[in-house]
Image: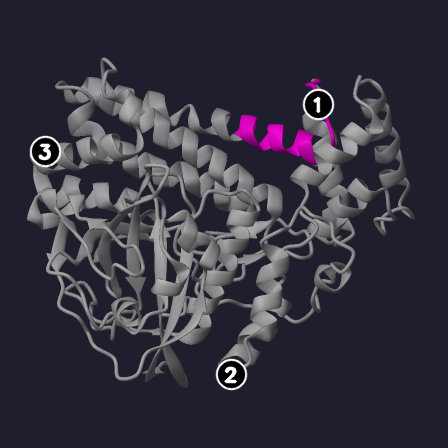
Amino acid sequence: MTQHFTHQAGWSLQHTYTALPEIFYSHIQPNKVSSPDYVLVNDRLAEELGLNPEGLRSDENLNRLAGNVASEQAIAQAYAGHQFGYFNMLGDGRALLLGEQKKPNGQIVDIQLKGSGRTPYSRGGDGRAALGPMLREYIISEAMHGLGILTTRSLAVVATGEPVYRETVKQGAVLTRVAASHLRVGTFQFAAKWGGKEALQSLSDYAIERHYAELKSEENPYFAFLMAVIKRQAALIAKWQHVGFIHGVMNTDNMTISGETIDYGPCAFMDTYNPATVFSSIDRDGRYAYYNQPHIGGWNLARFAESLIPLLHEDQDEAIKLAQQAIEQYSGFYQENWLSGMRSKLGLFNEEQEDLALANRLLELMEQHRADYTNTFRALTLEENTGLESDEGFNEWLQQWNARLDRQEQSLSDVQNLMKSANPSVIPRNHLVEEALEAAESGDLSKVEKLLEVVTNPYEYRVEEPAFCRPGDPDRGYQTYCGT
C-alpha cells in the first residue's frame, strides 16, 4: 500500500513491512507534542530521498516529523535480542516507522521517528528522547557516512517543546532516521522463538527480497542469505576498527541484516590508541571494548545462524552443520577485510606475507606510547612527525615500511593518494562533540553546524582542519551514555 502525504515535501511512502504476519509489529497512534520546531534538516539527504528541502520545512511536515500526525499504517516493530549476553523480548520502545520511501535511484529505505513516544514495547519507558542524544546521533551517523561506512542516516531533528526527565530535566526531541531497513539479528531471534517456522520464513523471504534479491535463485537461498549477512558484517566491523570507532552496545538487536551501523547510543571514536578502550557507562566488564568488537560480531552472527536453523535444512543435524560451516568463515572474512584496509592505510597496493606483522607492529608501538590513533595515520600520510620518532623501535619500523613501499611499482604520489583515501584527517572528537551539544542545548547551533561541515568531509585534508584534529584531555575519563 502506498500513501501520499505532504506533497510539497515529495513523500510517497509505502508500507511493505505490514504484509508480514502481525506478530512482527503494532500499529501506533500519534503521541502528540505541544510545540514542535525544527532544529536541523539534512538538505543533502532530503534530495537523495527525492524530497524537496523547502517543502520538508512546512508546518504540515513538521508535525509529521514530530510524531503529531501518523498514517494508519505507521507501526512499531517487534524484535528480541541479547543485551550484554542476556536474551530479552524487545521492540521499538520509542520509535515509529512511518513507512518506506523509494529514492530516485530505486532503493527502498525506512523512514523512522526516534523519540516519538510510547509504544507497546516501551517496557515502562516514556518513549521520548532528549535533544543532546538526538543531535549526537545526527552528528555521528553523518560522520560515519562521510567516512564511507555503511550506516543509518539522519534526516532531521525536531524539538518537541516539552521536557524529558532523566537524571536532570532535558529538552525533548525527535530524530528522523533513514535506514536501508530496521531488520535486525534480534528480529530473527524474535521470529524463531515466538513466530514459528512459517513466520520465520516470511521474514527471511522479505529480507532476501529487500536486501539480497540476487540470492532468490540459489539452491539454498537461506544458507546464501546467512553467508551474505556474515560477509557484510565482517566488512562493516573491519571498517569500524580502521577508524577507531567504538559502537558501545553491540547487542544483537543493534546488528542489522543490511550491514548498516545502527543505534548510536554510547558510541565514540578513540583518541589515544588503546585496544581495551570502553566509553559506555554501562559496559563495566568491557564486553564491547574496541578490541572485542570483531569477536562480538561473530558471537552475534552465531545467534543469527541459530535463528535460521529451521530454514537451512529439513534435517536438524544437517542444518546445524550448515550454520556452523557459515559461522566458521566469519573470522577469515573479517581478517581479510581488516588487513586489506590496513594495507590501504599504509599505502600498500599489493600483498606481501609480512604485511600483517608490519601493521600489528605499528599498532603495538602506538599503544606503548599512547599515540593518537587518527593523528598517527594522518602524520604518516602527510609525511609529518608522528611523535614516535624518539623510539628506536619506531624508527626500525619506518625503515621496514619504507622498504616495503620501495618494492611497489606505484609512485610516492600514488601512495599518498591511497593513504588519504583511507586515513581520515578528522573524526568527531569526543570533546568537540560535547562542546557542540552543550552550545546547542543553550540555543547556539553554530558549533554543531561547523562540526558537521568538517566531519562529513573527513578525507579532504583542508587547511583549517588542525583545530579539529587536536585530541581531548586523555586523563578526563570520557564516558558515554545510552541517552534513553
Foreground of the two, 72 or 3: 3
Tell me, for residue 107, which label it has, or none.
none
Q: Would you say the residues marked 1 and 2 are in contact, meaning their CB atoms lie under 8 Å apart?
A: no
Q: Would you say the residues marked 3 and 2 are in contact, meaning their CB atoms lie under 8 Å apart?
A: no
From mark 3 to mark 2, how far is it between C-alphas?
52 Å
Q: Amino acid at mark 3?
A: Lys
Residue ID at (39%, 82%): 171
Taking 344 as reference, is 73 above or below it?
below
- Dividing the picture into quadrants, the one containing residue 330 is top left
- Residue 351 on the magenta segment: yes
Residue ID at (14%, 18%): 315
Q: Nearer the viewer, mark 1 or mark 2?
A: 2
Q: Which residue is mark 2?
A: 443
What is the secondary structure assignment of the residue under circle 1? loop
- Dividing the picture into quadrants, the one containing residue 70 is bottom left
Q: Which residue is mark 3?
A: 197
Residue 172 in the image: state x and y as whole percent. 36, 78
Give the mark nearer the N terminus: 3 vs 2.
3
Q: Which residue is mark 1?
A: 349
Residue 120 falls left or right of residue 306: left
From mark 1 to mark 2, how far is it between C-alphas?
48 Å
Residue 399 in the image: state x and y as whole percent. 88, 30
Q: Amino acid at mark 1?
A: Phe
Residue 372 in view here: yes
Q: Amino acid at mark 2?
A: Gly
Residue 288 falls left or right of residue 358: left
Instruction: Provide the residue span drawn in magenta.
Output: 335-352
